[in-house]
Amino acid sequence: MHNQNEPKTVADSAVEMRYLVMPNDTNPQNSIFGGVVMSWIDMAAAMVAERHSNRPVVTVHVGDISFKAPIRIGDHVLIQASINYVGKTSMLVGVKVIAENPFTGITRHTTTAYLTFVALDDIGRPIQTRGLIPETDEEKRRFESGKKRIEDMKKSKTK
């Protein structure tokens, strides 16, 4: 286990989850309810934030969720979540959802979302979280993009 103040890498806290789309997850068009996908996204992202901070976390913002393609009954769904940026108390987690037809093997990138979390101290107040060490070029790009995303979010709150 890491020291509470020691920075972590993106890989240290990344999460992958898989689901099978069942009839009770879907609407009359046999595609998944957006709210089901959103709950899966929030769960995976919260697990990333908890793993990064080693603290309880709360979702403070869900932004830029994009539904790009439908997910159908019987599809296998892969949710990939990783931390993109860490500020003083905020953690930005990026989530990618991929649906796979298990019979053809064809995969589709169906959903993307960005969620912001804060870690909580023992009495439920936001606390400073550990740093992030982006290692790959892609992780560094996501870190800079995440920094801008958080700055833009803060600017829009002060307007």
Image (cartoon, rainbow, N blue to C red):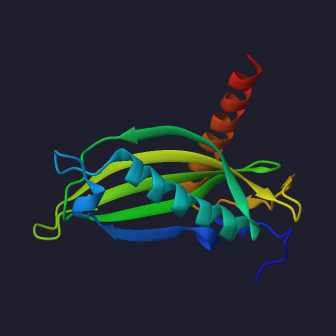
Quadrant of the snapshot with the N terminus: bottom right
- Tell which of 42 and 103 is nearer to you: 42
Residue under the point 67% across and 70% down: 51
Residue that protrudes farthest toward the left in the picture? 104
Can residue 95 be seen from the camera position used here? Answer: yes
Image location (x, y in percent) of residue 147: 68, 41
Can residue 135 be seen from the camera position used here? Answer: no
Image location (x, y in percent) of residue 108: 25, 54
- The relative height of residue 17 versus residue 109 in the rendered view (above or below) is below
Image location (x, y in percent) of residue 144: 64, 43
- The relative height of residue 51 versus residue 24 in the rendered view (above or below) is below
Quadrant of the snapshot with the C terminus: top right
- Tell which of 43 and 79 is nearer to you: 43
Residue that protrudes farthest toward the bottom in the picture? 1
Residue under the point 31% across and 63% down: 77
Determine the image quadrant of residue 79: bottom left
The count of marks equals 0
Residue under the point 56% across and 68% down: 14
- The relative height of residue 12 versus residue 113 in the rendered view (above or below) is below
Residue under the point 84% across and 72% down: 4
- Tell which of 138 and 64 is nearer to you: 64
Image location (x, y in percent) of residue 93: 59, 53
